[in-house]
């Protein structure tokens, strides 16, 4: 359910905010109001699991959209938009969405104890001259206002079951009638019944236009939650913006009680803006968390070798990758050589070492003769290289040139020194220049493309994540940034 809702949010964002071809003079007269001051917030019942809120205006970026996408792309977005509206139970007929929508939208979900699927509540503002009939395109028009209307379409599924129009031109639609009643009650008791995300909007995101809030790491598609610890009161906030052909997605774990806001991340993010000599993958983390990011780029022998090496290494490593060449750098505990010697994948490999400038260079090679279909042939295995100094140990599938050793060492120590004595979590991921084969670990990209049948093609061009937590702090700093290309 959560994936479908977030997918709907992304596509509706494209349709509402990026896909309009015409802009009415009415919209151009409206200023882009502070998102924390939108009246739509008063219609949000408390205790939602997920909330998306937007005040984006299509006029802000229409020219950029039309400049960067061709008519086929736009037709694809319109096709998906119509499919989503149909899934929700909305049929605008001959109306244009841009002529109905009035620059305020929220989508939220709530637990439903009677069924597995969460309930959904959508609130949007429409033009004063528009009404429910314009959204439902019913054969028998609805005349009454201020009444909850049941949505029914014969022989069709509709996720939204009820709809209501307020006197101040807000449409409230939900899968559950009680949520609409709760929404009306919340508006009558505003501001005493402020939504649980209202304070965060004003405190952190008043200058943003598209924000997604969730309360659980597992409900957020954009954070790697496998090894992160979350406090109960944490909120995960994600901002979405379009720049040329990129959707830029930034996600933060914030906590009002602990004064953990987006400003807490500025210094951490700036500290990690390191020049990695254009390495495609730069990860400072434990090897276990890093392997999946490099797996699509290496052969089966190297995968087995790293998986076996992972059984011995517990400290953070720096993993650098360029094309298919990779390097792992770690502190030398003077047991690393024996660890390498115990690796089963290197059994029967020949080792040769050479010392130069306080470094010991070693190469592990294997060349054998094998019989296949009664033919004798030579089999050459991928070489493995190690470089050892008093402080560092490096493992690589290619020989590192002398000139690079110092810069690689500096990068490792620069990151290693940022890990404080009390930090039991400190990880940084910087992955860029990806192609479709290398985004297998970003499952939400694959799922988006599958869900929309590749009509809209999403691909990741860059991914960053920083996570940090210290003793005795209960709240982690977790930040991620995705740059998602559309129609590439």
Image: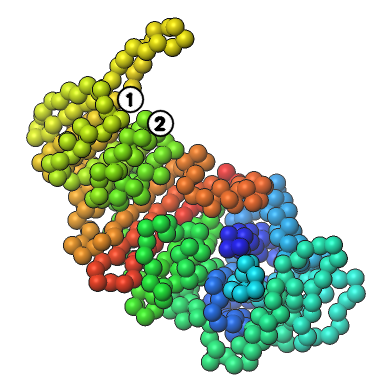
Give percent across and percent down for residue 419: 23, 58
In the rendering, at what x and y percent does residue 440 appear? 49, 44
Answer left or right for 251 relative to 308. Answer: right
Quadrant containing the N terminus in the rendered view: bottom right
Q: Badges 1 and 2: C-beta atoms under 8 Å apart? A: yes
Coloring basis for residues:
rainbow
Q: Which residue is mark 1?
A: 382
Among numbered discs 1 and 2, the one appearing first in the sequence: 2
From the viewer's perspective, tell me whether residue 80 is left or right of residue 305: right
141 vs 368, left or right, is: right
Residue at left 36%, top 50%? 289
Seen at 41% across and 76% down, the residue is 233
x then y, percent, for residue 424: 25, 61
- Which residue is more in the foreground, 145 or 387? 387
Q: Quadrant of residue 353?
A: top left
Farthest residue, direction right: 140
Q: SS class of the residue under badge 2?
A: loop
Badge 1 density bin: few <14, some 14–19, many ≥20, Cα 10 Å: some
Residue under label 2, please give it: 299
Q: Is residue 461 visible?
A: no
- At horizontal 59% and vertical 82% (from top left) the residue drawn is 45
């Amino acid at each position: 359910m959560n994936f479908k809702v977030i997918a709907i949010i992304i596509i509706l964002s494209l349709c509402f905010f990026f896909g309009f071809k015409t802009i009415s003079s009415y919209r151009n007269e409206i200023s882009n109001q502070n998102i924390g001051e939108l009246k739509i917030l008063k219609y949000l019942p408390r205790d939602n699991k997920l909330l998306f809120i937007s005040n984006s205006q299509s006029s802000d970026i229409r020219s950029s959209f039309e400049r960067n996408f061709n008519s086929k792309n736009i037709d694809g977005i319109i096709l998906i938009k119509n499919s989503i509206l149909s899934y929700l139970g909305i049929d605008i007929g001959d109306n244009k969405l841009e002529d109905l929508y009035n620059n305020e939208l929220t989508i939220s979900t709530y637990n439903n104890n009677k069924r597995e699927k969460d309930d959904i509540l959508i609130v949007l503002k429409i033009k004063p001259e528009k009404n429910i009939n314009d959204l439902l395109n019913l054969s028998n028009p609805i005349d009454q206002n201020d009444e909850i209307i049941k949505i029914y379409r014969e022989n069709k599924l509709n996720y939204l079951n009820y709809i209501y129009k307020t006197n101040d031109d807000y449409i409230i639609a939900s899968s559950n009638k009680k949520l609409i009643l709760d929404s009306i009650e919340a508006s009558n008791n505003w501001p005493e019944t402020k939504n649980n995300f209202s304070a965060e909007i004003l405190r952190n995101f008043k200058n943003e236009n598209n924000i997604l809030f969730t309360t659980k790491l597992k409900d957020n598609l954009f954070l790697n939650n496998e090894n992160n610890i979350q406090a109960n009161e944490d909120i995960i906030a994600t901002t979405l913006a379009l720049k040329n052909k990129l959707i830029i997605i930034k996600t933060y774990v914030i906590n009002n009680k602990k004064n953990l806001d987006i400003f807490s991340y500025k210094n951490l993010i700036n500290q990690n803006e390191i020049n990695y000599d254009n390495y495609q993958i730069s990860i400072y983390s434990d090897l276990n968390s890093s392997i999946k990011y490099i797996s699509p780029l290496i052969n089966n022998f190297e995968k087995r070798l790293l998986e076996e090496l992972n059984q011995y290494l517990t400290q953070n490593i720096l993993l650098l990758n360029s094309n298919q060449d990779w390097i792992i750098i770690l502190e030398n505990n003077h047991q690393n050589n024996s660890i390498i010697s115990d690796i089963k994948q290197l059994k029967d490999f020949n080792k040769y070492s050479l010392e130069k400038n306080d470094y010991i260079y070693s190469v592990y090679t294997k060349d054998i003769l094998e019989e296949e279909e009664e033919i004798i042939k030579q089999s050459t295995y991928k070489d493995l290289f190690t470089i050892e100094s008093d402080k560092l140990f490096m493992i690589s599938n290619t020989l590192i040139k002398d000139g690079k050793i110092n810069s690689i060492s500096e990068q490792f120590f620069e990151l290693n020194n940022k890990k404080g004595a009390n930090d039991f979590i400190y990880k940084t991921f910087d992955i860029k220049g990806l192609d479709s084969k290398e985004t297998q670990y970003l499952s939400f990209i694959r799922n988006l493309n599958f869900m929309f049948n590749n009509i809209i093609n999403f691909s990741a061009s860059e991914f960053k994540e920083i996570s940090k937590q210290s003793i005795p702090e209960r709240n982690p700093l977790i930040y991620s940034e995705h740059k998602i290309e559309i129609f590439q």
